[in-house]
Image (cartoon, rainbow, N blue to C red):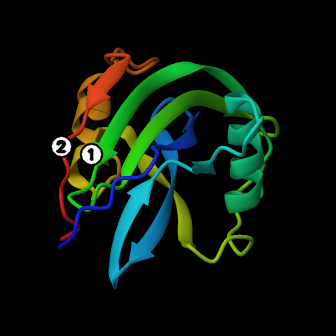
Amino acid sequence: MATEYTSPRVRVAACIVRDGSDVLLVQHEKDGRAYWLFPGGGVDAGEHLRDAAVREVQEEVALSVKIGGLLFVAETIAPTGRHVIHVTFLAELLSANDEPATGGDDRVKAASWHAIQELGDLMFLPHVGGVLASGWNGTEFSVPSFIPCHWKELS
């Protein structure tokens, strides 16, 4: 496999907590293998990170959110050289009665709520699920601001 180094891609995401125990995740599929991640996506040139997160959540799951503080930054570098910097913010729904809807983005196969304590058991990208699950105290996350992630192939 040839290494193809390119400029890093910046991906923003929103960690939306519901009822103090669940977070919203979206399921993507690549090469027939499914994985979960926080709703989000790429930052456009000239776009502020928080604005990109609001736009991406709307595009992926048709929800309106208010972006809060930075939760963590992580990065992954694939053996091919694909380099992604993940910037994840806390976020809150602007309407508590809203439920996620898919269909606006073909990559999103599902959107559903998952118990924070189970994040370490999911194929979660970037691979920070265990850190998040162990850092949840029932009301907030206590996690490092930078979480190093070693590349793992999807299984």
Tally the numbered discs. Answer: 2
- Numbered badge on residue 127: 1
Inspect the image, locate mark 2, and give the three-letter code of the amino acid beneath it: His
Image spot of residue 61 (x, y percent): 69, 59
User: Would residue 4 be found to the left or right of residue 54 on screen?
Assistant: left
Instruction: Tell which of 63 and 125 is nearer to you.
Output: 125
Instruction: Tell which of 30 and 43 is nearer to you.
Output: 43
Q: Residue furthest bottom?
A: 32
From the image, which quarter does the C terminus lie in? Answer: bottom left
Distance from Cα at disc 2 to Cα at disc 1: 8 Å
- Numbered badge on residue 55: none
SS at circle 1: loop
Residue 86 is drawn in which quadrant?
A: top left
Q: Which residue is mark 2?
A: 150
Residue 76 is drawn in which quadrant?
A: top left
Q: Is residue 100 in view?
A: no
Question: Residue at (56%, 28%) from the top-left corner?
Answer: 89
Inspect the image, locate mark 1, and give the three-letter code of the amino acid beneath it: His
SS at circle 2: loop
Question: Residue at (32%, 31%) from the top-left corner?
Answer: 132
Vertical placement of 32 versus 13: above or below? below
User: Would residue 136 be found to the left or right of residue 52 on screen?
Assistant: left
Is disc 1 surrounded by few (<14), some (14 to 19) or many (20+) residues within 10 Å?
many
Question: Residue at (34%, 82%) from the top-left corner?
Answer: 31
Image spot of residue 100 (x, y percent): 68, 59
Is disc 2 surrounded by few (<14), some (14 to 19) or many (20+) residues within 10 Å?
few
> Mark 2 or mark 1, which has the lower sequence index?
1
Q: Is residue 147 in view?
A: yes
Vertical placement of 21 versus 2: above or below? above
Residues at marks 2 and 1 touching, judged by CB atoms closer than 8 Å? yes
